[in-house]
Image (tube, helix red, strand yellow):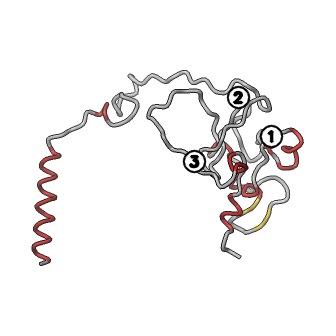
Amino acid sequence: MKKIISVGLITLFGMSSYLLADKKLDETELGLRKAPLNDENKVQLQNFIFGTGSAGESQKIERAYENAPPMIPHDIEGMTPITQEDNACLGCHSPKIAESIGATPLPKSHTYDLRNHKEITEGIAEQRYNCTQCHVPQAQTKPLVENNFKPDFRDEDKKHRSNLLDVINQGVQ
């Protein structure tokens, strides 16, 4: 019985390899950019337009799903590069300041050191200083492909707030 299954699988694999061998894709068909992958000369970058409002004047963008990193709804020109020593984001999004000026405060997950299991009382966890690793400005573009995904938030507050640290700690106690 094992020999019959083995022979059948080998035959199936051989036939599929033979049928697929004749169908070669042109390298312009492999991605969404429609240009050869090894030639940057024909690639034309779009002139993306980002949110034109300055920080504090822009409208918050609903998260893609619960606990997703929120998009940056304002221009970040002049705020980068972000380093551990110089992080312009903390000027508004630090939990001590954010509420008073109407900015989204950093969630508890950013002021907790997951490696050493301790809360950070001043600043943020050193793993979290590079804000643009997860949070990016939203360009005003047309989608390249249709997206029918609809997020399912457990409550309305999670569209603009994170409870990631609570979720991580569920069942740990």
For the residues bearing labels 2 and 3, Cβ distance under 8 angstroms? no
**Closer to the camera: disc 2 or disc 3?**
3
Please name the amino acid that badge 2 sits on.
Glu
The answer to whether residue 155 is left or right of residue 95 is: left
With respect to residue 120, does 56 lie above or below?
above
Element marked by disc 2: loop
- Find the distance from the CA under tag 1 to the CA under tag 2: 18 Å
Q: Which quadrant, please, contains the N terminus?
A: bottom left
Instruction: Tell me, for residue 151, which label it has, or none.
Output: 3
Q: Nearer the viewer, mark 1 or mark 3?
A: 3
Label 3 packing within 10 angstroms: few (<14), some (14-19), many (20+): few
Q: Residue at x 63, y 38 (%)?
A: 136
Residues at discs 1 and 2 in contact (Cβ within 8 Å): no
Q: Does label 1 or label 3 sit earlier along the sequence?
A: 1
Q: Amino acid at mark 3?
A: Pro
**Tag count:** 3
The answer for how far apart the CA atoms under marks 2 and 3 are is: 30 Å
Q: Nearer the viewer, residue 6 or 127?
A: 6
Q: Secondary structure at mark 1?
A: loop
Residue under the point 69% across and 64% down:
114
Say which residue label 1 marks. Answer: 103
For residue 30, above or below residue 112: above
